[in-house]
Amino acid sequence: MKFTAENLKNDIKASMGQIDLDLILKNVKLLNVYTNEIYPASIGIFNKKIVSINPSEDTKAKETIDCGGNYAIPGFIDGHVHIETTLLTPEALGEVIVPWGTTTMCVDPMEIANVSGIDGLMALVENSDNLPFRLFLEVPSRVPTAPGLETTGGVLGVEEVSKLLKMDVSISLGELDPSKILGIKEEYLEKIVSSLNLGKICNGHAIGLGEKDLNIYATAQLSDDHESVTYDELLERLRLGIKALVREGSSERNVEELIKGVVENKLSTENLMFCTDDKHVNDIFNEGHISYNIQKSIDLGLDPIEAIKIATINAAKHFRIEHMIGSITPGRFADIVILKDLSIIKPTMVLKDGLVVVDENGYRGCEKKEYPKELFTTVKLSPEFSHKDFIINSEGKRVKCRIIDLVKDQIINKEIQEWMKIENSQLMIDVDRDILKLSVVERYGKNGRVSNGLVHGFGLKRGALAASVSHDHHNIVVVGTNDIDMEVAVKKIEKMQGGFVIAADGKVIDTLALPLCGLMTTLPALEVMELMEELNNNVESLGCSMSAPFMSLSFISLPTVPELGLTDFGLIDVLNHRIIDLITEVEV
């Protein structure tokens, strides 16, 4: 929002009582995040903003709401999220995040940019002022994520990134992985400089870095990181001035480990923030959004005021937008959450821009938006694609192979090596040892590549799972117990123009269509949740007990998360940023 002298003049007059206020919230217990105080107050709101605390008794307002002595706290801020992995459009997403008190999302839309470039990104954020939550843009810095190691549908170079950074909605340069900094890659340094020269921060993605490399990372002006898994990792980052986002997604559960360490070591929380990064709609609806991070932290022994500050003013200060949001103080936008109990994070009312968007009658809703037709036709398989593309040929009696070993509740994985049988010159998977075939199929109609690897940890006893959500390139990723079911699943994704598919016994068992760039659906949130729950139940019937199997599947191919990734180019050694062989030894 642009500030104008006329608006400022009217705000001042409203604060003086010379213009009627739009709303007064009276009889609240106000949490002041600057002084850690809680005190009785009323809140005067005009033209979307807070203009007075405890306006005089004779101040007039178009509406007054008695909050019954409940607590008034600032709206919650998600400091880093890929909104596409909720599977919902921003318009539909409001239905599940706003009732939990989230009023601001700091969004890195690198997923849609990797599929459809700047046009897709702009379509996603267009008219974001009409949303029931505030959307700020973390401009994607790595589209593609791994140039030369993957095929993508879109590219954002220095020129496009610099253009996006100049937009009012932009607050930072989106996350940069270590290879771009440690490799001193000129293009990404130029993007950093562009952001810094506009007075905006640069987000980090410092996964797997030790102290030496973290020093280099911080020197390059990367100011935060959301990839801490252990308390020691979090502490290392804070010691170097890298602020930490404590993440709780669907497959990355970090709050308990990190906040437990913070409480036990009595660590200051002033440089901590919360984020979800990637969280499916069902998990948000059932357990909460940023509210879950706060609640979990309180349950672990963190003072409620400190937990709320992590979710509000800390993030606002970090992104240099504390003059706009993060506190209930004059001049800030009236993004406010009303709670009955400060230690139970269940809002009874939520306001954004001084308008009630959630109350005892429920969520107020949001108008649906039309997206460009070309964003619904992004999946184009090679005409020659078939199950034969999944065959891994080899000589000998058996071979030793690199295998992606999943780590429970995390997106990181480990490399293990196991001997695999060869029959008729083809590598055989081993369902009994839970070593399954993992493949990536190029879906942009550019080259038709198919690469194959092996994965441990899914637990499938039969069938196959496929997804067009596959970070960050978003080619089709498929895991299976046999090549035929894998083919069936992949071809169904093309027919749906994106989504999740379960196949078994040569047939499609269940689907969730995600036709918007192969990443999102335009369906309402509640309908998507029902479909997703049924999908997960059907996955479980095939032997997989994962709580979020498709989220785990979507991260396996990521070439920037240690130790291994799989793209349409082949198996990736993440830390050394290179393609490596699947087979390491052959026994003749």
Image: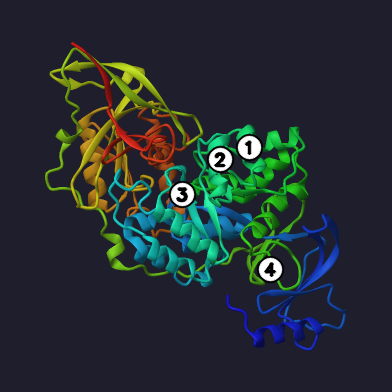
Residue 144 location (% of width, % of height): 35, 51
Note whether 315 is above or below 160 in the view shown: above
Pick whichever of labels 1 and 4 is earlier in the sequence.
1
In terms of secondary structure, where does tag 2 sit?
Answer: helix
Looking at the rendered image, the disc whose residue lies closer to the viewer, 3 or 4, is 4
Measure the C-alpha gap from mark 2 to mark 3.
39 Å
Disc 4 element: loop
Residue to which mark 4 is pinned = 323
Q: What residue type is labelled 3?
A: Met
Kindly report which numbered mark, 3 or 1, lies closer to the viewer in this rendering. 1
The label number, if any, that marks residue 236 in the structure image = 1
Residue designated by label 3? 529
Which residue position is annotated with label 2? 214
Residue 413 visible here: yes
Q: Is mark 1 on a helix, strand or loop?
A: helix
Q: Distance between the residues labelled 2 and 4?
A: 30 Å
Distance from label 3 to label 4 (Cα)? 36 Å
At x 29%, y 46%, the residue is 148
Marks 2/1: CA distance? 8 Å
From the top left corner, tell me how far across and down residue 357 is, in percent: 61, 66
Identify which residue is drawn at 11% across, 44% down: 384
Tag in front: 2 or 4: 2
Between 279 and 213, which is closer to the camera in this rendering? 213
Question: Label 2 amino acid?
Answer: Leu
